[in-house]
Amino acid sequence: MLDLGRYVRISLVLLGGTAPLSVAIGRRYGFTAGRRFGMAMGGNLLVQEALVGLAARRANRRTGHELGLVDVMTLSRGATAALLGGLAASGVRDRRGLAGWMGWLGVLYGAILCDWLDGPIARHTATSELGEVLDREADSWLTLCTALAAVRWGGLPRAVLAPPLMRYAFLLDGMRRAPYATLHGGEPSWVRQQGIAQMLLFIASLAPFGGRVTRRVVCVAAPIQVPLQLGGLLLQRRRER
């Protein structure tokens, strides 16, 4: 059976960060902003933990897999996505202030530090189908929430939301025809390279210290990156079929 107590403790730790962050946002930007932030981040995490709990329970019944250290790190990337969603919902657009630094440092942790650390750890511990699913979907959700942040206060056009949204549309359609595990087999290396380029664009747009040069670079890069990303998704879609 799934160690329910351990899973609950992990969930409570992740949810526990919502309150102090909401207070910080509320003190700096007002009660309404803090309340919106807390509701959005907390709701995001509740949905995440509910879905992960169901997936972990099913995986535990089939293989006996329990959530390990790598899985916890993966879930923390989901918490970063929830943080960005909360900031977007708060209505605050303060790239150079507290909210901007909070979101940018969160992205650096989720997209760079955590992603860099969990690979070596996974190679020295047991991996599972569940862990692979959590890793892939945490990346996708973080990408979508970071894209939303890049639009809300990073100055990027709404078009940057198209690739991460299209990925979910293709995923839902693909799952009607084949099991999830078969939809991402044998992905070419350029898929990851495109994802890295996409996230670097978002990180640059959200940088609190970014000046005019950075603004110009991301504004020029976005119209180039989005068609390439969409084209890559369509090509990958054809390969899967």
Image (spheres, grey):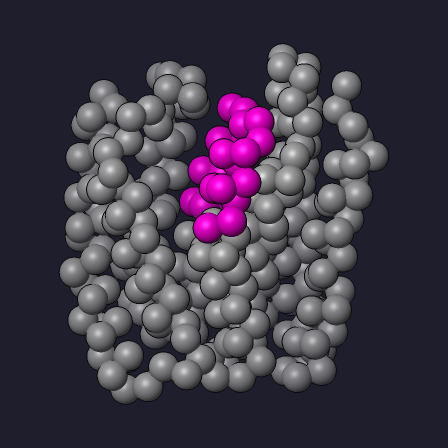
Q: Is residue 145 visible?
A: no
Q: Position of residue 37 (x, y in %)?
A: 64, 66
What's the residue at 44%, 80% (across, down)?
208
| Image position, residue 118 (x, y; %) | 52, 44
Q: Quadrant of residue 233?
A: top left
Tell me if residue 81 comes above or below residue 202 in the rendering.
above
Q: Residue at position x 54%, y 27% from top?
A: 127
Name the spot of residue 90 as percent of width and height, x first: 58, 70
User: Is 184 colored magenta in this rendering?
Assistant: no
> Can residue 56 be seen in this snapshot?
yes
| The magenta segment | 116-140
Residue at (24%, 34%) from the top-left corner?
188
Q: Main secondary structure of the magenta part?
A: helix
- 225 vs 207: above or below: above
Please tell me which residue lies in front, 175 or 181: 181
What is the x, y in percent for residue 185? 33, 24
Whether 131 is among the magenta residues is: yes
* Quadrant of image for the N terminus: top right
Q: Residue furthest right?
A: 5
Above or below: residue 49 compared with residue 185: below
Give left or right: position of 211 versus 55: left
Residue that protrudes farthest toward the front in the picture = 124
